[in-house]
Image (cartoon, rainbow, N blue to C red):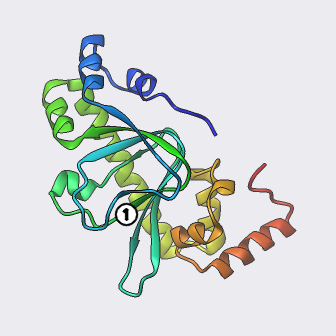
Amino acid sequence: MKEFSFNNYLTSNVNADEAQLKELFKHCSRKSFQKGEHISLNSAKQEYIYFVEKGLLRQYSIDEKGKEHVLQFAPEGWFLNNREMLHLNKPVEYKVEALEDTTVFNLSVELLEKLEDEIDGFSTFNKKLMTNHIRHLQYRINLLLSATAEDRYMSFINMYPNILLRVPQWMVATYLGITPESLSRVRKELASKNFNPNS
């Protein structure tokens, strides 16, 4: 488990001078959550975007039958937020849970909008995040509509190479849109081919 510095991340990825970055960091705060703790409740207004420095989060929804559906995992170095709330001003309909003891940096939505107006480099950075989010979303929709269970699992391994041993298999299955039994069959078939996802 590698820890990521939010300071180093922004310094490397945002085209802004030292004074601008210092101003940004003044408005950010580091928070810690214990394993099992929920960061935002269902239908509550989420006011922050989160950068995971250490630990692991999951974003999920619960359908009318009480079944959970994992939308995203966020390990170290990942951002997690609700784009609907940020850009369409809609209430958040998802839950966020710490799957491990987790440390995040949070940035308020209000400050995010202010920074986009004041720092060209931050506006470019945020647009890049949005583009990557849309690309990932389209790719995942295509997988769920047309890919086999094995292809979905292989895609998951490529996207999240360091969390297989950190996440319960039933959560992986809900992320993939398959049953835990189907995931077990896929893993057995791959094991019979001497494939080791943790190697």
93 or 135, nearer to the observer:
93
Tell me where residue 186 sits by quadrant. bottom right
How many labels sit on residues? 1
Left-right relation of 133 to 195: left
180 or 103, nearer to the observer:
103
Look at the numbered disc 1 and give the secondary structure of its residue.
Answer: strand
Q: Which residue is mark 1?
A: 95
Tell me where residue 32 sits by quadrant. top left
- The residue located at (27%, 54%) in the rendering is 83
Q: Residue 27: x, y in percent?
A: 24, 28
Q: Residue 38: x, y in percent?
A: 41, 58
Q: Residue 171: x, y in percent?
A: 56, 68
- The residue located at (66%, 56%) in the rendering is 164
Q: Residue 63: x, y in percent?
A: 38, 80
Counting other residues with Cα less than 10 Å from the Cα at mark 1, is it few (<14), some (14-19), or many (20 or more)?
many
Tell me the amino acid under the disc marked 1: Lys
Left-right relation of 110 to 158: left
- The residue located at (27%, 32%) in the rendering is 124
Tell me where residue 79 sits by quadrant. top left
